[in-house]
Image (cartoon, rainbow, N blue to C red):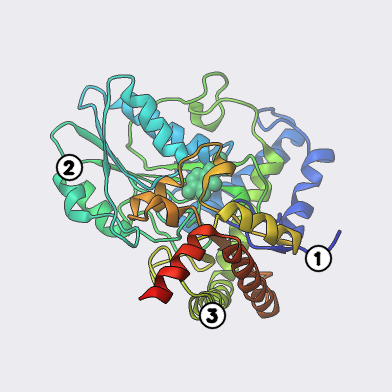
Amino acid sequence: MKKVIYLDNAATTRTAPEVVDAMLPYFTEYYGNASTIYELGGSSKKAMNEARETIAGILGAQENEIYFTAGGSESDNWALKATAEAYRAKGNHIITSKIEHHAVLHTCEYLEKNGFEVTYVDVDENGKIKLGELEKAIRPTTILISVMFANNEIGTIQPIREIGEIAHKHGILFHTDAVQAFGQLPINVDEYHIDMLSASGHKLNGPKGIGFLYIRKGVKIRSFIHGGAQERKRRAGTENIPGIVGFGVAAKRAAETMQERTAKEIALRDHLIDRVLKEVPYTRLNGDRTDRLPNNANFSFQFIEGESMLIMLDMEGICGSSGSACTSGSLDPSHVLLAIGLPHEIAHGSLRLTLSEETTLEDIDFVVDTIKGIVGRLRDMSPLYEDFVKKQAAK
Ligand SMILES: *Cc1c(COP(=O)(O)O)cnc(C)c1O
């Protein structure tokens, strides 16, 4: 395989070798069901408890507030659907933002079809939620505010503490989808007034198909999967012990290396952003310049199609992502890019690059040089660009 420069870490990450090493014995050696009483099952249970303890420690939570799930999407579904059901007597109104992950947005749409009302609060041009609008949206019937910690497309970090304060001031539960933030940013559930928090293993060099939902003690929440007594009877099913072990190791590793790793990523990210904005004309950065995930860069290049760019980057061994049509199977560009006010034609020319601890300065320089070439070639073929150049010349 030719050298790949992988800059799509918001989509998924490489499972760290020590994570895989830690998982392997739980397939072949310690394969016991954690619900059994013999020693073999006890090994599984012990490993699971260790992972739960690690994760709870990172968040400043209690062990019995961490519920393992099959990933971020399940955690988001659970938080929203079960809260809606459990608090139905108090009210039927939910507040979220326009730029949530589809795991939240599509769950909200489902709830709307089932008698709930949802307010989708606007964001500003940098993707920050409008706090005034959020507070104004609160009704006596509001039962839940769900706002993501950091956005997966444009990297913008939300004022989570302020949102939590607003929620609690009004006696409303606060859920945050922290799938992108967990492992990249320090999070303390008490400091941020978080009642529920979703995270996923494969976004922080852990395995795929494992996640957790933090549920604060005292929150009334219904079982999501009915069956056995696993996860305090709230999420039945034989536990995914290898996945849980891997997630625990990945979370510990991410917490321990956070400061150094993210400082390095921020330096490379800023180098990438600075070079692209300086060297590629008619380009903009999407998302907040400073309140953004350490590894996220998202650009819009005028007069070109993001999809064409991705294919040309792939030919050079570079993996990125675009907020435009084809990948999502719809003709509309990303709901996030539209929510920050980009016109369709600009949103279509978008490119998201998300770094990892393995990304080097050489990688970034190669990527910027490649982008310059590709943007140049695509614009040379673009009738829109030709028109634009002619108009400029006529001025
Ligand atoms: C990836 C992602 C999810 C979904 O997580 P899965 O584990 O893939 O189901 C949810 N929210 C955000 C913000 C994400 O980036």
Q: CA distance from mark 1 to mark 3?
A: 25 Å
Q: Nearer the viewer, residue 248 or 118?
A: 118
Mark 2 close to ligand 1, CB under 8 Å: no
Q: Which residue is mark 1?
A: 3
Position of the N terminus by quadrant: bottom right
Query: The residue under label 3 is which amino acid type?
Result: Glu
Residue 363 in picture, x, y percent from top left: 69, 74
Residue at x 30%, y 52% (from the top left corner): 193
Q: Is residue 114 left or right of residue 44?
A: left
Q: Is residue 324 left or right of residue 309?
A: left
Residue 302, placed above or below residue 174 = below
**Residue 23, label in figure:** none
Residue 248 seen in the current view: yes
Query: The residue under label 2 is which amino acid type?
Result: Ala
The total number of labels drawn is 3
Residue at x 34%, y 49% (from the top left corner): 194
Q: Which residue is mark 2?
A: 137
Residue 38, placed above or below residue 44 = above
Please tell me how crowded label 3 is: few (under 14), some (14-19), or many (20+) other residues with Cα within 10 Å. some
Q: CA distance from mark 2 to mark 3?
A: 43 Å
**Mark found first going from the N terminus, 2 or 1:** 1
Which one is in front in this view, the residue at disc 2 or the one at disc 3? 3
Q: Which residue is mark 3?
A: 279
Q: Secondary structure at mark 1?
A: loop
Which one is in front in this view, the residue at disc 1 or the one at disc 3? 3
Q: Nearer the viewer, residue 272 or 302?
A: 302
